[in-house]
Image (cartoon, grey):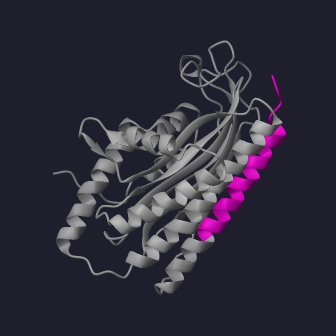
Amino acid sequence: MTDWTARTDRARQWFETLRDMICAEFEAIEREAGSTACFEYTPWKRAAVEGGEEGETGAETGGGTRGLMKGKIFEKVGVNVSTVVGSLSKDFAGTINGASAEQNAFSATGISLVAHMANPHVPAVHMNTRFLTTTKAWFGGGADLNPPIPYDEDTAEFHAELKAACDAHGADHDRYKTWADDYFYIPHRKVHRGVGGIFYDHLECADEDAWEANFAFTRAVGEAFLAVFPRLVRRRMGMEFTAEDKVRQLEWRGRYAEFNLVYDRGTLFGLKTGGNIDAILMSLPPEATWS
């Protein structure tokens, strides 16, 4: 099996760079609103997973950093970067691309972001990109917009920025947009989680050229997110809102929580591979209601 360690490290360095750029931009927005809020960073170390390979306990299994900010504009925003290695539990390995009970070694590095906003007119958002290895190696990720009160202008601008990133790298935007629509859907509610974006997975890296191309596209997705989302925040963050708007936001957040706890594969992967519980569940909103 190819040793992907050096490429995993390159991907990790990019995810950390992207985190730093995003956090700086979000803090700048808080400054513009007269807030002194800033990110607090908590490092964590991964424990070996029960059911992994014998002898894994005590080995270097990675970890990450959880960044969290609660401010005037960003009611709660988490930006996490993690890099973990080890062995998948044998019953879970068969659900992961390129893994099996007999070949259950893996590595994963990625950035995950969820922002819940104070003003109901400002869309919440999710972004995640990652690089994983088993007997195969691949990139995945995407970004999707989750406004409690949708605006067609914002939706169109968000999709246009992601489409431009796809087009520049020969990626099939229509396919990835449809994938996001299908994935971010709450079957028991028969509603979508938001207004979509893109979602892609299993961009496999069979050779060096494929790895470089997929890595370049993944970087472009992160840069597109950084270009468009702060514009949307600045456009809406000063708008007046009513008590009814807030009720609408809190009910919508309940739907968001349902999806992440019941259907989200990233949440399951993190819990099954010994991830940091607080980092995994930072996607949950600070407050929500169910009627």
Q: Is residue 25 left or right of residue 15?
A: left
Q: Is residue 128 left or right of residue 3?
A: left
Identify which residue is drawn at 67% across, 65% down: 20
Q: Is residue 31 left or right of residue 49?
A: left
- The residue at the far top in this view is 102
Q: Quadrant of residue 120?
A: bottom left
In the image, is residue 69 above or below residue 103? Answer: below
x and y, in percent, of residue 283 in the image: 45, 52
The answer to whether one can see residue 36 in this image is: no
Identify which residue is drawn at 22% across, 69% down: 245
User: Is 227 one of the magenta-colored residues?
Assistant: no
Q: Quadrant of residue 83?
A: top right
The answer to whether one can see residue 253 in this image is: yes
In the image, is residue 12 above or below residue 35? Answer: above
Looking at the figure, which quarter contains the N terminus? top right
Q: Nearer the viewer, residue 121 or 287?
A: 121
Identify which residue is drawn at 70% across, 43% down: 214
In the image, is residue 107 above or below residue 144? Answer: above
Identify which residue is drawn at 63% across, 61% down: 223
x and y, in percent, of residue 134 in the image: 69, 26
In the image, is residue 41 above or below residue 281? Answer: below
Q: How would you classify the magenta stretch by its main secondary structure?
A: helix
Q: Nearer the viewer, residue 153 or 277?
A: 153
Question: Where are the magenta residues, as a range?
Answer: 1-23
User: Is 18 one of the magenta-colored residues?
Assistant: yes
x and y, in percent, of residue 174 in the image: 48, 44
Q: Nearer the viewer, residue 47 or 4?
A: 4
Q: Quadrant of residue 289?
A: bottom left
x and y, in percent, of residue 82 in the image: 65, 47
Q: Is residue 253 left or right of residue 278?
A: left
